[in-house]
Image: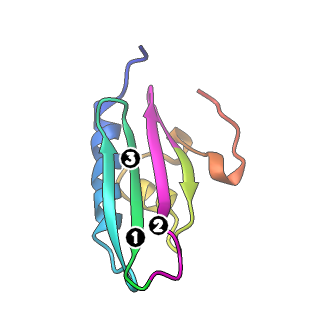
Amino acid sequence: MDRVDLDLATIVQHEIEDYADGDWWKASAYAVCDTTRHVYAVLVVPDHPRKFQAGIVVMARVVNDHVVIDHDTTDRPFVDALVEAGIPREKIICLYAGEPVRL
Protein backbone atom coordinates (compact mmCIF):
# COMPACT_ATOMS: atom_id res chain seq x y z
CA MET A 1 0.00 0.00 0.00
CA ASP A 2 1.21 3.49 -0.85
CA ARG A 3 2.20 5.85 1.92
CA VAL A 4 -0.35 8.61 2.37
CA ASP A 5 0.55 12.09 3.56
CA LEU A 6 -1.65 12.33 6.67
CA ASP A 7 -1.37 16.13 6.77
CA LEU A 8 -2.93 16.27 3.30
CA ALA A 9 -5.62 13.81 4.37
CA THR A 10 -6.46 15.93 7.42
CA ILE A 11 -6.76 19.10 5.34
CA VAL A 12 -8.89 17.40 2.67
CA GLN A 13 -11.22 15.92 5.28
CA HIS A 14 -11.58 19.29 7.03
CA GLU A 15 -12.37 21.09 3.77
CA ILE A 16 -14.89 18.41 2.71
CA GLU A 17 -16.63 18.74 6.07
CA ASP A 18 -16.64 22.51 5.59
CA TYR A 19 -18.35 22.15 2.20
CA ALA A 20 -20.99 19.88 3.72
CA ASP A 21 -21.72 22.54 6.35
CA GLY A 22 -22.32 25.12 3.64
CA ASP A 23 -25.62 26.63 2.61
CA TRP A 24 -27.46 24.16 0.37
CA TRP A 25 -30.70 25.44 -1.14
CA LYS A 26 -33.57 23.05 -0.39
CA ALA A 27 -31.21 20.17 0.36
CA SER A 28 -29.12 18.56 3.08
CA ALA A 29 -25.43 17.91 2.62
CA TYR A 30 -23.38 15.19 4.26
CA ALA A 31 -19.63 14.68 4.46
CA VAL A 32 -18.76 11.10 3.60
CA CYS A 33 -15.24 10.24 4.75
CA ASP A 34 -13.43 6.94 4.34
CA THR A 35 -10.36 7.66 6.43
CA THR A 36 -8.91 4.20 5.81
CA ARG A 37 -8.83 4.63 2.03
CA HIS A 38 -8.48 8.43 2.23
CA VAL A 39 -11.55 9.13 0.09
CA TYR A 40 -13.72 12.14 0.92
CA ALA A 41 -16.97 13.38 -0.61
CA VAL A 42 -19.99 15.61 -0.11
CA LEU A 43 -23.35 13.98 -0.75
CA VAL A 44 -26.34 16.26 -1.29
CA VAL A 45 -29.87 14.97 -0.66
CA PRO A 46 -32.70 17.25 -1.88
CA ASP A 47 -35.60 18.02 0.45
CA HIS A 48 -39.07 16.56 -0.24
CA PRO A 49 -40.70 16.73 -2.68
CA ARG A 50 -37.60 15.80 -4.67
CA LYS A 51 -37.16 17.25 -8.13
CA PHE A 52 -33.61 15.91 -8.32
CA GLN A 53 -31.82 12.77 -7.15
CA ALA A 54 -29.27 12.70 -4.38
CA GLY A 55 -25.71 12.82 -5.60
CA ILE A 56 -22.07 13.52 -4.97
CA VAL A 57 -21.08 17.12 -5.63
CA VAL A 58 -17.40 16.91 -4.60
CA MET A 59 -15.12 13.88 -4.31
CA ALA A 60 -11.40 13.84 -3.57
CA ARG A 61 -8.77 11.29 -2.61
CA VAL A 62 -5.30 11.46 -1.15
CA VAL A 63 -2.85 9.32 -3.09
CA ASN A 64 0.71 9.30 -1.77
CA ASP A 65 1.54 13.00 -1.46
CA HIS A 66 -1.09 14.32 -3.90
CA VAL A 67 -4.77 15.19 -3.75
CA VAL A 68 -6.83 13.85 -6.64
CA ILE A 69 -10.17 15.60 -7.16
CA ASP A 70 -12.34 13.16 -9.08
CA HIS A 71 -15.55 15.18 -9.15
CA ASP A 72 -16.55 18.79 -8.50
CA THR A 73 -19.83 20.35 -9.59
CA THR A 74 -19.89 23.17 -7.05
CA ASP A 75 -19.96 26.89 -7.77
CA ARG A 76 -16.80 27.34 -5.69
CA PRO A 77 -14.08 24.99 -6.92
CA PHE A 78 -12.73 22.62 -4.30
CA VAL A 79 -9.22 23.09 -5.68
CA ASP A 80 -9.36 26.75 -4.60
CA ALA A 81 -10.36 25.78 -1.06
CA LEU A 82 -7.45 23.34 -0.85
CA VAL A 83 -4.94 25.91 -2.10
CA GLU A 84 -6.31 28.46 0.37
CA ALA A 85 -5.91 25.83 3.12
CA GLY A 86 -2.21 25.54 2.30
CA ILE A 87 -1.90 22.70 -0.20
CA PRO A 88 0.39 23.68 -3.10
CA ARG A 89 -1.47 23.67 -6.44
CA GLU A 90 1.16 21.34 -7.93
CA LYS A 91 0.10 18.71 -5.35
CA ILE A 92 -3.51 18.76 -6.63
CA ILE A 93 -4.79 16.90 -9.70
CA CYS A 94 -8.23 17.85 -11.05
CA LEU A 95 -9.24 14.68 -12.88
CA TYR A 96 -12.75 16.02 -13.46
CA ALA A 97 -11.18 18.84 -15.52
CA GLY A 98 -9.01 16.50 -17.57
CA GLU A 99 -5.70 17.13 -15.81
CA PRO A 100 -3.29 14.23 -16.30
CA VAL A 101 -2.31 11.94 -13.46
CA ARG A 102 1.26 12.75 -12.51
CA LEU A 103 1.90 10.71 -9.39
State the CA–CA distance, disc 2 to disc 3: 16 Å
> Which residue in the protein does label 3 denote?
40
Look at the numbered discs 2 and 1 and tell me whether their residues touch, using CB distance below 8 Å: yes
Disc assigned to residue 45: 1
Q: Position of residue 41 (x, y in %)?
A: 41, 52
Decide: is 48 above or below 13: below
Q: Is residue 56 magenta?
A: yes
Q: Residue at x 35, y 56 (%)?
A: 16
Between discs 3 and 1, the one toward the N terminus: 3
Decide: is 47 above or below 21: below
Q: Amino acid at mark 3?
A: Tyr
- Between 5 and 44, the one nearer to me in the picture: 44
State the CA–CA distance, disc 2 to disc 1: 4 Å
Disc assigned to residue 54: 2
Q: Amino acid at mark 1?
A: Val
Look at the numbered discs 3 and 1 and tell me whether their residues touch, using CB distance below 8 Å: no
Q: Is residue 53 magenta?
A: yes
- Between 20 and 49, the one nearer to me in the picture: 49
Q: Amino acid at mark 2?
A: Ala
Q: Position of residue 83 (x, y in %)?
A: 44, 55
Decide: is 25 above or below 1: below
Which coloring applies here?
Answer: rainbow
Instruction: Indicate the secondary structure of the residue bearing disc 2.
Output: loop
Q: Which residues are magenta?
A: 50-68
State the CA–CA distance, disc 3 to disc 1: 16 Å
Q: Local crowd at mark 2 within 10 Å, few (<14), some, or many (≥20)?
A: some
Between discs 2 and 3, the one toward the N terminus: 3
